[in-house]
Image (cartoon, rainbow, N blue to C red):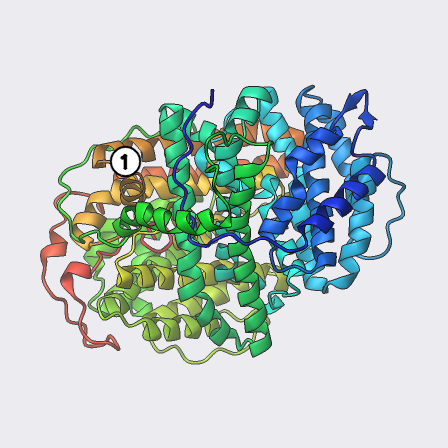
Amino acid sequence: MQPFVLPEFYLPHPARLSPHLAGARAHSKAWAYTMDMIDVPQHGTVIWDERDFDSHDYALLCAYTHPDAGAAELDLVTDWYVWVFYFDDHFLELFKRTGDIEHARGYLDRLGHFMPAAGAITETPQNPVERGLTDLWNRTVPQRSAGWRRRFRESTRNLLDESLWELANINEGRVANPIEYIEMRRKVGGAPWSANLIEHSVHAEVPDEIAAKRPMQVLRDCFADAVHLRNDLFSYQREVEDEGELSNGVLVFEKFLGCRTQEAADAVNDLLTSRLHQFEHTALTEVPALFDEHGVRLSGRAETFAYVKGLQDWQSGGHEWHLRSSRYMNEGALSPRGGLGMSAIRMFSSIASTAPQRARAFTHRPFERVGPVTLPEIPMPYPLRLSPHLAGARENVVGWARRMGFLSESLWDERRLRAIDLPLCGAGIHPDASPEQLDLTSAWLTWGTYGDDYYPAVFGARRDLPGAKLMTSRLKLFTPTDCEPVPPPLNPLEAGLADLWQRTAGPMTPAARRTFRASIEDMTESWLWELVNQAQNRIPDPIDYVEMRRRTFGADLTMSLSDHVVIPPELHRTRVLQAMKHSATDYACLVNDVFSYRKEIEYEGELHNAVLVVRSFLDVGQDRAFTIVGDLIAARMAEFQHAVDVGLPSLQADAALAEYAESLQHWMSGILHWHRNCQRYAEPPTHFREGNLHGSRFPHGSLHGPRFREGGLHGILHR
């Protein structure tokens, strides 16, 4: 029996089928035989026999997911999918079933020789996976641009290498937490790789100047998450019950939420739906503005929309294939009289059934009364250390803020600045700082907090997004990477940034300066994202919220202030260090959300809080949402500890990596200590009832009391 009933999926686009299906079936089968993928034992095990190959029907998958591809392109794409599914099953039989992680690592390392960034393949293939990759690489890569080749090589490398993460979890009996799972599934699941092949099959490359921008990243990530979550629902029985796999979204939700399998499957389907809603929202509202911002030519716009259409085709076509392939759990899911016509009928039914979920994101009533809340238990296994220079920093930051003009506006006064006690946070995240370094850290915290309070107060209430964009673009003038002259500052925010940039970036190398500047730009541009959601009264999609929260929190900026360890870039990009950084960041962000929940939801009318996001997404009460967020805090801390205790030794960690891990431990303990000891979250927050505050020096007039936020760590340590 099936372990759960498949839920009703959101299917906004009808599936279409390529007319070249028969040719692709014949070609791919002949190709698989040529590569020794059918009926040829590998280490004594036949991975596929002819019946397996025919019943899986990968040509049908590609004919559904690439309906507009020409015959030659469909043949090539189908061969790629035959190869990737064979790799998955080959890796399963050789390594996942045996737990042989050392030989698995060598196996994956060799595959890198068969996808060179430039030049010819010189290694001799020794198994069907290597032979297939050699053939496909030579047939595909020479036709594409350098930008596409770079993206495709990276996504293929991730697809292969992150199989080790799955294998390690199986060996440890470890089920990932939901945030970790979504991040890692994107790599090991291969959907970004599929997105690259969509560009190839429709002869439409995304212009390189926008390929790495947020809207295109969101489209790719939403596509990937939806593809993978859909696959998890159909493959749960095979993966979890037969193969002993632990990397499945239904299992992840089942364990994390402590619920029945059916409830977990329904929650996974809700997340799949939310990601598709986010995809549509981004394509319609963010991509056109991106074209204008970067002056993309008409040809580039047309190719981008062809790519977006290709992503939509893959979603609907992939669903149809899952309904038919013997590889998956799909009993009773396909009507006996079904065909492509049924796909259109299901589309209308699915839109109606998922409408309440979409509506919840837009129908929240701001300033909802939530009453006193009980904080969840928050783990902190690392001891707190505070800089001995805290007292001096407290006085010095007040003088600096006054010189920059922060206290001459109506937004802040000295009482508020002292009450939030930003140097206390600086002293915790940077305990070994010199007096000068602690002053600098405290000033950066002050600047970021002031900026994030300024944006909603000045631009939010008036829905003045053009004004906010103009200010954000001007701020970039004060972070020159090559010591260019800067214009005279026009306001305290510009004056503060000009001062801090000169003091901080001056001694840096040009490369370090560019990285540091990017962390500032990510934070200031994320403030625009918040303003747009506020104007639309839109509670963010949960995954988009977590990923943007890292930017609104200013994590990269504040981590760089307290971390002076030099680590090679290739190590920074490893899964272990990324896991440490992201889990630490999410821990701190979620801690802030539970402390600030009442102030934000009841007194500020905010939408950007994890507790509210969970309430809306899962349609649960406030107490249950707090419990879930508390569990996420604990899970992210546990993941950080796992990365330090298990992951770092696998990198043969030296003293620098250990020091980096310690700096993140200080960062988390300092942030938690600040939340527990500053006056920002004292109740009742009477300052929100002061009425309208008029600031004649603000360029857009008055500050409106209900939307005004008392200066706190909203930018760098709040949002």
Q: Amino acid at mark 1?
A: Ala
Asked if residue 408 can be seen in this view, the reply is yes
The residue at which mark 1 appears reads as 625
Residue at 42% from the left image edge and 25% from the top image edge: 255
In the image, is 184 to the left or to the right of 126?
left
Residue 9 quadrant: top left
Residue toward you, 329 or 440? 329
Residue toward you, 651 or 544? 544
x then y, percent, for residue 344: 43, 52
x then y, percent, for residue 677: 26, 39
In the image, is 69 to the left or to the right of 356?
right
Residue 124 quadrant: top right
Residue with the most extreme front position: 337
Q: Badge 1: few (under 14), some or many (20 or more) residues near its Cα, within 10 Å?
A: many
Residue toward you, 457 or 398? 457
Q: Which element type, helix, strand or loop, lies under badge 1? A: helix
x then y, percent, for residue 366: 18, 54
Q: Is residue 139 above or below residue 123?
A: below
In the image, is 584 to the left or to the right of 696?
right
Asked if residue 568 can be seen in this view, the reply is no
Residue at 31% from the left image edge and 59% from the top image edge: 533
